[in-house]
Amino acid sequence: MPRAGQAAGRNSAETGRLSGLNSTARLLYALTLSGYFGIMALLPLWYGWLAPPEVVSPAVAITLLGLPLFAPLRGLLHARRYTVAWSLFLSLLYFTHGIVEAWSASAARFPAILEILLSLLWLIAGIAFIRATRAVPAGTSDIQH
């Protein structure tokens, strides 16, 4: 019988993934999520209020740019290293989008720079989180000679 808060058929290492992390890994995980959720919050603000697009409907822009963010949501919330790793490719998409918008649209320069900074936070903190949580086999050194 599973304990409260534990799914049937899953061991405690799988459900309590965050409880096994050290403080550095927890901080990096929080920074990764901050960048991710920051972009998720920025897009509706940007295209719905700050600088609505002139060519397409704001709803279309928000949907097309926001929908890919939901793909890694579950894995990121469960601190799965594999999901964090592949979601970093997604952060590069938003980094590129921010660069293009900052360069081409002067009205959207502030939200574009914010998107660049948030995507870099997501990327750098995610890489550091993956490095901080990798398993080192017993009897080996993490330092290469």
Image (spheres, helix red, strand yellow):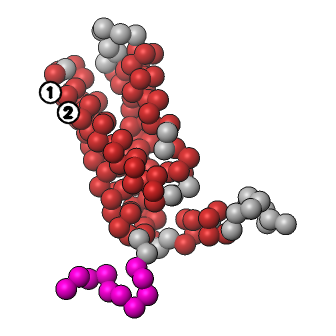
**Rendered view: 107 above or below 13:** above
Query: Residue 15 shows which numbered tag?
Result: none
Q: Which residue is mark 2?
A: 99
Q: Is residue 99 left or right of residue 46?
A: left
**Between residues 55 and 10, which one lies in front from this camera angle?**
10
Q: Residue at x 39, y 19 (%)?
A: 61
Residue 79 locus on image (x, y percent): 51, 58
Q: Is residue 100 left or right of residue 136?
A: left
Residue 73 locus on image (x, y percent): 52, 44
Q: Is residue 94 visible?
A: yes
**Rendered view: 102 above or below 8:** above
**Rendered view: 45 above or below 126:** above
Q: Residue at x 41, y 23 (%)?
A: 64
The answer to whether residue 138 is magenta is: yes
Amino acid at dot 2: Ile
| Structural crowding at the residue carrying mark 2, measured as other residues with C-alpha within 10 Å and reported as few (<14), some (14–19) or many (≥20) | some
Extent of the magenta region: 136-145
Q: Is residue 105 left or right of residue 36?
A: left
Q: CA distance from mark 2 to mark 1?
A: 6 Å
The answer to whether residue 106 is magenta is: no
Query: Residue 103 shows which numbered tag?
Result: 1
Q: Is residue 41 visible?
A: no
The answer to whether the residue labelled 2 contacts the one labelled 1, judged by CB atoms less than 8 Å apart, is: yes
